[in-house]
């Protein structure tokens, strides 16, 4: 089986994606999310992602949590809209670039992300970033719209089945403020 490094934003989003990809790839998950605010929320999401990956016998790696890295990248875009806004694109790029870098360094055949399972994320922006990164690294980008074929619906079903914590906002401080 070919090896795939899967960026995971949270346990619920990883469920249907792992289920789909595990059929054809040897998956390792990467939890790299410096955008998550506050740190307690980050720890909760990490704990759940680790729990779910262990249920599926999938290795989960954690990259350092350094929110300042995210703040530097999105500086000047704080008021941008979610989904198709420039702030989200910069956030996707930060996390996908780290995933591509690690995938290339550790000789994975492919890299991808669970982000596209969410109906709140623009898959075209995500895939465009992935294809650009593929040119700079030795691993290929696995493009997908994981919400298709009832992927999002399946993620909700699996989250309920495994009693996973389902957050009420994307993760960043701006999506949290908008929620309130």
Image (cartoon, rainbow, N blue to C red):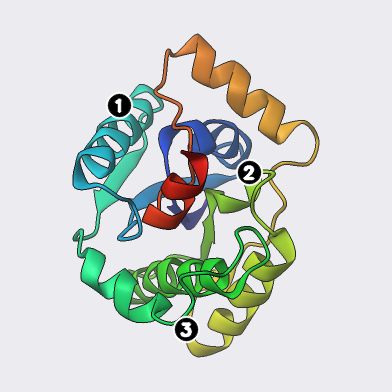
Q: Is residue 106 left or right of residue 89?
A: left
Q: CA distance from mark 3 to mark 2?
A: 26 Å
Q: CA distance from mark 2 to mark 1?
A: 20 Å
- The structure residue drawn at horizontal position 45% and vertical position 71%, both measured from the top left corner, is 78
Q: Secondary structure at mark 1?
A: helix
Q: Secondary structure at mark 2?
A: loop
Q: Nearer the viewer, residue 1 or 41?
A: 41
Q: Secondary structure at mark 3?
A: loop
- Mark 1 vs mark 3: give the one in front: 1
Image-quadrant location for residue 19: top right
Q: Is residue 29 left or right of residue 132?
A: left
Residue labelled with disc 3: 137
- Mark 2 vs mark 1: give the one in front: 2
Please say whether residue 8 is visible from this viewpoint.
no
Question: Tag 3: Cα neighbours inside 10 Å, few (<14), some, or many (≥20)?
Answer: some
User: Relative to 11, is 74 above or below?
Assistant: below
Q: Is residue 83 left or right of residue 148?
A: left
Question: Tag 1: Cα neighbours inside 10 Å, few (<14), some, or many (≥20)?
Answer: some
**The label number, if any, that marks residue 118 in the structure image:** 2
**The label number, if any, that marks residue 165 in the structure image:** none
Query: Can you give x and y, in whole percent of width and height, for residue 129 in the image?
Result: 60, 76
**The label number, if any, that marks residue 51 in the structure image:** 1
Query: Can you give x and y, in whole percent of width and height, for residue 51 in the image?
Result: 30, 26
């Amino acid at each position: 089986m070919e090896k795939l490094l899967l960026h995971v934003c949270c346990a619920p989003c990883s469920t249907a994606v792992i289920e789909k990809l595990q059929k054809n790839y040897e998956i390792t998950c990467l939890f790299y999310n410096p955008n998550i605010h506050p740190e307690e929320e980050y720890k909760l999401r990490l704990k759940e992602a680790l729990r779910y990956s262990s249920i599926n016998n999938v290795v989960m790696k954690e990259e350092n949590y350094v929110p300042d890295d995210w703040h530097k990248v999105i500086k000047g875009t704080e008021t941008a809209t979610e989904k198709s806004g420039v702030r989200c694109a910069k956030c996707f790029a930060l996390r996908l670039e780290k995933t591509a870098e690690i995938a290339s360094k550790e000789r994975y055949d492919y890299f991808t992300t669970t982000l596209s399972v969410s109906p709140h994320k623009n898959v075209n922006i995500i895939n465009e970033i992935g294809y650009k990164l593929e040119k700079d690294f030795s691993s290929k980008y696995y493009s997908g719209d994981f919400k298709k074929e009832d992927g999002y619906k399946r993620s909700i079903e699996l989250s309920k089945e495994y009693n996973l914590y389902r957050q009420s906002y994307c993760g960043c401080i701006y999506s949290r403020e908008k929620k309130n």
